[in-house]
Image: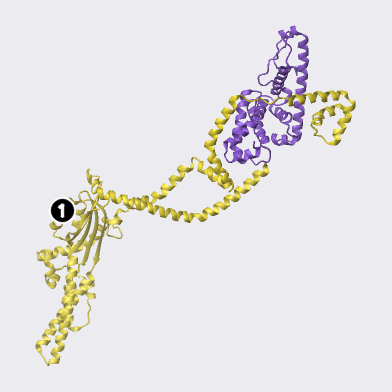
Chain colours: A purple, B yellow
Amino acid sequence: MYCDEHLVSKSKNGDLQAFEELVCRYERKVYSIAYRMTGDYDDANDLAQETFLRAFRAISGFRGDSSFSTWLSHIVTNLCRDELRKRYRISVESLDQEVCLGDAEVKKQIPSSDPGPDEIYEKLELQEELQSLLNTLSPEFRLALVLRDLQGFSYQEIAEQMECSIGTVKSRINRARNFLKEKILNQREQNMRWEQNPQESRLYNVKGGDANEL
Amino acid sequence: MNCKEVQENLSFYLDQELSVDEMNQIKTHLDYCSACREELASLQETVSLLSSLDEIIPPASFRQELFAKLEKTATQGVRVEQKEKSLCRYGGLRDRFRALRQNTVFWPVAITMVLLILISPALLDGIRMGGSKSADSSLIAEEFDYGQGMMSNQARTDESLNSMEMQSATNGMAPKLMVTSDNNARRKADGASTPQLMMDMKEAGEPLVAAQNEVESNTVTARKLIKNAEMYLQVDDYDQALNTLKENVITLGGYITNETANAVDSRGTKRGNLQIRIPQYRFDEFLIGMDDFGKLKNSYIYSQDVTEEYIDVGSRLKTMRTKEERLLNILTQSGNLSDVLDVENELANTRAQLESLEGRMRYLNNQTEYSTVNISLEQVVASTQQVSASGLEGLGVRVKEAFIKAINNIFLGLGISIVFISAAIPYLVVAGILFVIVWGIWRGLKQKRK
């Protein structure tokens, strides 16, 4: 198995197979970031492919200041951010007027008569819920969160990538986290209420538009 | 620190993005503040929830589609990229040139310029040919307005005509015969006298005074002119024009001295030259008649006034004759041998001079009697008077010539362009240096802004 640097230098020389090997290594990561950012599988598909294509075209200019993986994530997050900005330009940017973006999941009510939830199922569901919550964030906040908590970049790196000051980064991360935290707590409360009142739950199929409750 | 402050900074506390001092402060606060501890816990949970988000496995089609696209890009771009790589070593200028080469505007412009350079000699040649055709084939240095020529000659013509008329009236003979007739007789027939001329006829020698007086009273007063013309005509039918011209000449009592053969040149035009002599008194009549022949491209009519010389020669002739007579008289009177020899010598000299003078006189007479007209005829290829297929004449030769000419022109063009480019190199070098400087500065500024 070759190391990344070796494959990169081979790709620079036009070795397509070497680059394809790199693709195999990082496709999940890139795809995940794209999905987390956009909340849509098709968009993620397109953006991830576009990321790799651009990387391939620009590989000769890759100086190796950062790792290949970091470089890739830069490309994908930029693409996603641009795409989101383009799409939701009309929508608000401030966190305070959050509007639900993208299709949110229908909050399924788990009637107690069903078999007990599998742990995996719960986890999956949880993840989907989280994603839908993420989707409610505006692009800048989403990006900050994804870079920090999903990708693990440092504040400095995030500031460089988002082309803003560290103060802005801090503020965004903080607010985004708090927002999510509130949402999750509210969601939990609701879930608990519904569990306690199964009858009620059947009648009220609440869609994921929690914006009114904020 | 109060709870509000702490809660604001919990995020950073988690990420350890605070100063040591601040971290400690919060830590202390958390020790005793359960509310804040709860906040921290829920925040932590949120973060860990986020972190726990799994990587998503892309669908199966992802790789296939991507690889297909990559291969397409690779075949298109790999050559370009490799060139890019090798060119990148030489800096940004090479990139500019590469971009320029790939620019869709560049190639048509470049090809057009090269073609222009190659064609330019032919173009210049064509312009030269069309503009001053007469310069190639005419024999004269400057153009002379035919109408004007007529006017200025008119005055003299009247005079000479008068005198000529009087001559022919008295002699009743053809002009040719005038040449051989006795000068004296002719002189006597001439008209009015000119006092001015009498003044000029002052010669040393008493014995000749009597003869001179006789001469003076009979001096020719009309001007002696040599009238010649050169004309360049464009005609519709060369052969026909030539024949008509010859007939006219004979009708007017002239004769042909020279005739050059007509030749068909590369454009299919027929050309020829005719030199004729026309009696001077019919000169103007002849010239007017030329109008009917064809289009007069240009003409050159000039007169040479040889009156002075004519009179001079005439009087010297007279003197010589008288001298000869006197010498003969002296001879008959006889004397001793040495005297006789001297006289014979003198006589011989005199006779020699006489002959040369007579020769000169004959020449002058001939020139003034007859005008020389040099006519060049040209038959145009595309006559506007009638349809003719003369444009196709001599096609084989013309095609070959044109072909060779074109090839020569290409070489000519190449030579010109090489010289031109060489001359331009210094300018390009200077411009290039300036450009590099300016571009370097611009790039530097751009970097700084970033």
Location of residue B106 in the rendering, given as x and y in whole percent from the top left corner: 48, 43
Q: Quadrant of the N terminus of chain B?
A: top right
Q: Residue furthest top?
A: A199
One can see residue B155 in this view: yes
Q: Residue at x 74, y 32 (%)?
A: A169
Q: Amino acid at mark 1?
A: Asn
Location of residue B350 in the rendering, given as x and y in whole percent from the top left corner: 17, 81
Residue B267, placed above or below residue B27: below
Q: Quadrant of the C terminus of chain B?
A: top right
Location of residue B67 in the rendering, given as x and y in whole percent from the top left corner: 57, 31
Residue B312 relative to residue A31: left or right = left
Q: Kindly indicate the quadrant of the structure image that contains residue A171.
A: top right
Query: SS class of the residue under badge 1?
Result: helix
Q: Residue at x 87, y 32 (%)?
A: B25
Q: Nearer the viewer, residue A90 or B385?
A: A90
Q: Nearer the viewer, residue B175 or B246?
A: B246
Residue B339 relative to residue A148: left or right = left
Which residue has dot 1 on it?
Answer: B243
Q: Nearer the viewer, residue A172 or A49?
A: A49
One can see residue B124 in this view: no
Residue B156 relative to residue B119: left or right = left
